[in-house]
Amino acid sequence: MNAELEKKIEQLEEEKMHLGLDVDVHKLETEKLRKGKNKAEEDLDSLKTDYKKLRLSIRTAGLGKTSEQWRQEIREEKYRSRNSAMKLKASLSKIEEMKGRIEELESTLRSCEIRTEHLEINESRQSEQLHHL
């Protein structure tokens, strides 16, 4: 019976170690996703700033242009505006995706921490039982 308890304790300690590693991996993944989310938000802010500057330059620039030059500039601005809007949508989508992944990882992390806690309690109980024998 002592050998069984010792074997069970060894198994629990090994499982605890693996869960600890899993927790560390999940923490690293969560941090990586947070950094990616922050970068995407910075990119989004930069795009918004560029868009505002572009709108301002459209209003203040271009005196003395021909009709064709104006039409060409308008086409280019529409193209840039569409590109900015698409980048903005892609960034927002990526942010939402990252938020979802972060929530999943945080949930998994909580699960692993709870499981580790239960294993530590079981290990403690089994150690106490072993000492009482």
Image: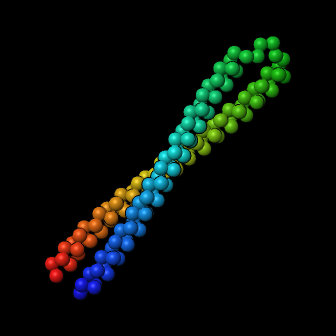
- Of the 4 image quadrants, the one containing the C terminus is bottom left
Query: In the depicted view, which residue is nearer to us: 113 or 86?
Result: 113
Query: In the depicted view, which residue is nearer to us: 76 or 46?
Result: 46
- Residue 73, by quadrant, is top right
- Residue 65, by quadrant, is top right
Relative image position of residue 127 (x, y in whole percent):
23, 74
Left or right placement of residue 72 versus residue 92 in this view: right
- Is 108 drawn above or below residue 97 in the view shown? below
Q: Residue furthest left?
A: 132
Relative image position of residue 5 (x, y in whole percent):
26, 81
Residue depicted at x 19% and y 73%: 128
Coloring scheme used: rainbow
Q: How many marks?
A: 0
- Residue 75, by quadrant, is top right
Residue depicted at x 68% and y 17%: 59
Relative image position of residue 19 (x, y in whole percent):
39, 66
- Is 119 drawn above or below residue 35 in the view shown? below
Residue depicted at x 54% and y 38%: 41
- Of the 4 image quadrants, the one containing the N terminus is bottom left
Left or right placement of residue 16 versus residue 30 in this view: left
Q: Residue furthest bottom?
A: 1
Left or right placement of residue 86 versus residue 18 in this view: right
Query: In the depicted view, which residue is nearer to us: 12 or 86?
Result: 12
Relative image position of residue 47 (x, y in whole percent):
61, 33
Residue depicted at x 36% and y 57%: 110
Q: Residue furthest top?
A: 64
- Is 53 drawn above or below residue 80 in the view shown? above
